[in-house]
Image (cartoon, coloured by chain):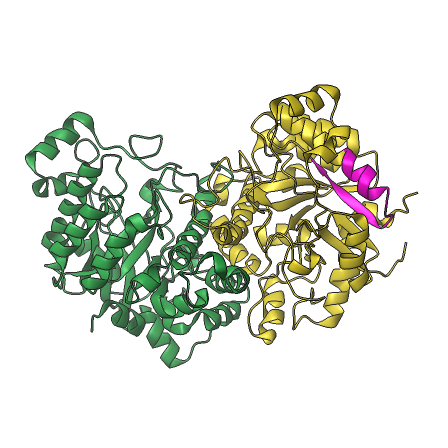
Chain colours: A yellow, B green
Amino acid sequence: MNEGGPIDCDLHPAVPGLKALLPYLDEHWRETVVRRGFDELVPISYPSVNPLTARADWRDAQGKGATTPERLAMEALAPFGTTLAICNCLYGAQVPFSEDIAAAFCRSVNDWMAHEWLDRDERLRASIVVPMLSAELAAAEIDRVAPDRRFVQVLLLVSGELPLGRRQNWPIYAAAERYGLPIGIHAGSTYRHPVTPVGWPSSSVEDYIHQASGFQSQLTSLIAEGVFSKFPALTVVLLESGVTWLPAYLWRLTKFWKGLRSEVPWVSDPPSSIVRERVRLTLQPFDAPPARAAVMRVIEHIGSDETLLFSTDYPHWQFEGAAAIPDGLDPTLAQKIMVENPRRTYSRLQETVS
Amino acid sequence: MNIDVLNWPALPPETASKLAIADCDVHPRPRGSGIGGVSKALCPYLPKHWREHVATFGLTYRQPWEKGSAYPKGQPLACRRDAWPDGDAPGSDLSFMAAQHLDPNNVALGILNPLTSGQGAQNPDLSAAITHATNEWQVAEWTSKDKRLRASVVIPFEDAAASVREIELRTGDPNFAQVLFLSRTADPLGHRRYWPIYEAAAAAGLPVGVHAFGYGGWPITAGGWGSFYIEEMVGHAQAQQALLVSMIFEGVFERVPTLKVVLIEAGLAWAASLAWRMDRQWAKLRGEVPQVKRAPSEYMRTNVWFTTQPIEEPEPREQLAETIEWIGWDRVLFATDYPHWDFDDPAHALPMRMTEAQRRAVFLENAQAVYGVA
């Protein structure tokens, strides 16, 4: 492994279709899927045809992006000299209403990922997809997959059935902590609730914009419920969350913590300190200000050079060409974001996997 | 506002603030606990059959509890401990409010935002009756007695037709300065079912104020109901982001270009990043929303204002000034939220360098311009 090379912390290999998962489903579910005529599990967070879902020049002849390790290597790794890349599969395996179906699909996605991607390019790593509506089954899946050390993180969607900090979810965090795996929280929803606190929007672009506020309320939940106190070794990574909302959000949360901390006495540190120590965010989309000089102002407001992790969000359309680093970001900081910060966040990236 | 109140010497009234200010979020409250969830003070303004209705069936909202709010507050009625007049609730006594807040803080313009006014009640006709009664009460008990104060037209916003009738009734009445929504609505505020209200407000020359809280029935997060009051309080910023995105992307400001929207009690520092995020996505995906003709941030620059309280408190505070620079100093309206516990004191709430012009704009002149009150 190249010690100094960039590490891309958020890429999205595409499941070509349900058929590709059939070999990785056990017999009962394989038969069920065929007999009942299951539809593709493509969540509306990223509709197939939406321009955001795959950049035009990254779509294949069928219109899909990120369909093979070869294309991913050529389009997402080569332009940046990326030496390690963390694959976060967004196929809707954790979305079904039945926890049994969700668990079966999560198992199949993880096994598909290991065989079809990780086995085929040694630079690739992945997150463990888990049936987040059942903490028990999610923890079992972590136990099953974590021994494969190419899996470096547990993946959750930001909006599920219950707020992420709720105690029902804690077995997931206990399992992740046990294996030294960060919890990666990705944009997206299981759509048990509207993506806003005031009901359903009318367009996909609104849904996507609202994802950032989804991260804000779930980070509040994780902090207020005491997840960071209960699991002192746990790191949380916000994936494709947007970045520039973070300072204003923390000013507000920290202010209310001062006024209302008697309600949540287990939160003994200011939320801004907790986030600085324990939470990381991937770079794309940055939601950059239009003025280049304002980029470093925002970084100062964040107050740490350790918070951000390089990502391309491939194949999602966040930038043109190879302009993954926001214009105006200090080059020394950019280097830290690309190499050092990911290595410190994901302990398993420091291992040589044979 | 977080200050060391224990060691805070009482300021002589004349030094608490030299500048006359506008307070764009003052909460009057009807006196008396009343029957069926409607305060006694409102009863004279309610028709007899509605008084009988609430006495028999009560007043319910889209939330679990018959009385009170979804989450227990940090203190009784979420109010300052020192804001209780003898024998009644904070905000219920004009002379007490004047002596404690309006006089010493030199409030030249106070916008009244009643919160226990039947907005969001499950029964839409009852909501219309109580909001109407609340408007009558504001004039009789407040604005007719203190010329510094202006009322909000509280409307039963889930029923656009009834809301339009109420707005038309108040058109041209100088007692009223804005039309008031609560932020937690049944649908995002850009949805077309609310458009007649915006058209009526613009026709009446009244800004639309949207105050935090409400009873839309949806959880405060996109991932379900949180456990704690602090989650709800912080979450009001996300709720206001949601309704602002909706109004812009549904094309409300194209449909009603003269509409003024004032976002109340949800902070403002988030507005800069939200504008950047909206602009970046709109630039790529605008084909889906052809009704959005301009960059979303441009509508924010022309049609949207933000009240300050509860003002964000970065360390160092100068970062707040940088953030306001991105939003626009002309967009910011000072507010205290009197008599609530998280009251922002005008003498202490914005401890950062401002030019004299910026200070005057934020504390007084922006509000005078938005509300058309000299």
Q: Residue at x 67, y 70 (%)?
A: A329
Left or right of A322, for residue B46: left
Choose top left, top right, bottom left or bottom right for residue A316: bottom right
Q: Where are the magenta residues, as a range? A: A111-129
> In the rendered structure, does residue A122 fall within the stretch colored magenta?
yes
Asked if the stretch drawn in magenta spans residue A307, the answer is no
Q: Where on the picture, by quarter, is residue B66? A: top left
Q: Where residue B312 sits: x, y (%)?
A: 46, 60
Asked if residue B364 is positioned above or below residue B341 in the image, the reply reads below
Front residue of A351 and B282: B282
In the visual, does A47 lie left or right of A193?
right
Residue nearer the viewer, B17 or A23: A23
Quarter of the image for the N terminus of chain A: give it: bottom right
The quarter in which the C terminus of chain A is drawn is top right
Q: Is residue B21 above or below residue A210?
A: below
Q: What is the x, y in percent for residue B316?
A: 55, 67
Above or below, comparing residue B246 to residue A289 in the picture = above
Q: Is residue A149 left or right of residue B301?
A: right
Residue at the spot 24% in from the left edge and 53% down from the top edge: B196
Q: Position of residue B325 (x, y in %)?
A: 47, 73
| In front of the other: B78 or B210 | B210
Determine which quarter of the picture holds residue A180: top right
**Residue B17 or B126: which is nearer the viewer?**
B126
Seen as rendered, the residue at the extreme right is: A354
